[in-house]
Amino acid sequence: MVRFYVVLIVAAVVFSIYAVADCAFFDRMRIRGLSRGWWIVVIIFVPIIGGLLWFLIGRGRAGRSSGGRSRTLAPDDDAEFLRQLGTEAEQDERIRRMEQELADLDADGATGDAAAPPEGAAGTERKRPDTPETPGESGPSGRPNG
């Protein structure tokens, strides 16, 4: 019988320590009833009942928000969602216009209307592949690549 009481006391102490730790680290916005300090006092001075009261009354639900609005809204009832759709539609329209302008510029460049740089301009000359007749430029060692 003594073992039973020892196990019961150890279980009560472990439960109380767990309740105090849970209360101490719990999100402040979700604590109901009393403030955090008062809940810890209740849990310590009324060991089993204080812990039970903490878990039944003091802990708020995860779904509750500080604004008191706990229900979810359908997308067509959410004003923020509807505003976001309007801005996305404007962005899509701007993207379509820019793509059309780029396609028009590409079409102008393909027909030759755009001013092409002269043949000998820097960066436009064509490189010939290295052949045995034209070994190529010399490398860092001073010897030709080829």
Image (cartoon, rainbow, N blue to C red):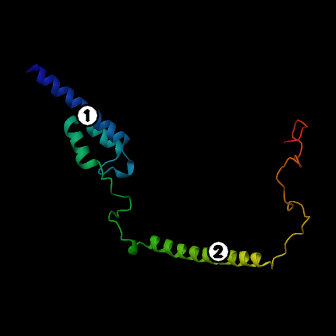
Report the residue at 39% width, 71% height from top.
75
Q: Is residue 98 above or below residue 133?
A: below
Earlier in the chain: of badge 1 and badge 2, it is 1
Image coordinates for residue 127, horizontal then vertical, percent: 84, 56
Q: Are marks 1 and 2 in contact (CB under 8 Å)?
A: no
Q: Closer to the observer: label 1 or label 2? A: 2
Circle 1 crowding by C-alpha within 10 Å: few under 14, some 14–19, many from 20: many
SS under mark 2: helix
Eyeballing the image, is 108 above or below 60?
A: below
Query: Where in the figure is residue 87, as x and y percent of width and height?
Result: 54, 73
Total numbered circles: 2
Residue at the spot of label 2? 99
Residue 111 x %, y %: 77, 79
Placement of the N terminus among the 4 image quadrants: top left
Image quadrant occupied by the C terminus: top right
Image x and y of residue 29, in percent: 38, 52
Alpha-carbon neighbours of circle 2 within 10 Å: few (<14), some, or many (≥20)?
few
SS at badge 1: helix
Q: Residue at 38% x, 74% y: name it.
A: 77
Q: Is residue 117 left or right of residue 79?
A: right
Q: Find residue 84 and name its label.
A: none
**Inter-mark Cα distance, 1 to 2:** 67 Å
Residue ID at (41%, 72%): 78
- Which amino acid is tagged 1? Ser
Q: Which residue is mark 1?
A: 16
Task: Kindly indicate the quadrant of the structure image that contains residue 73.
Answer: bottom left
Q: Residue furthest front?
A: 133
Query: As shown in the figure, which amino acid type bears the numbered disc 2?
Result: Glu
Q: Residue 34 or 116: which is nearer the viewer?
A: 116
Q: Quadrant of residue 138?
A: top right
Picture layout, residue 22 above or below residue 107: above
Residue 26 vs residue 92: left or right?
left
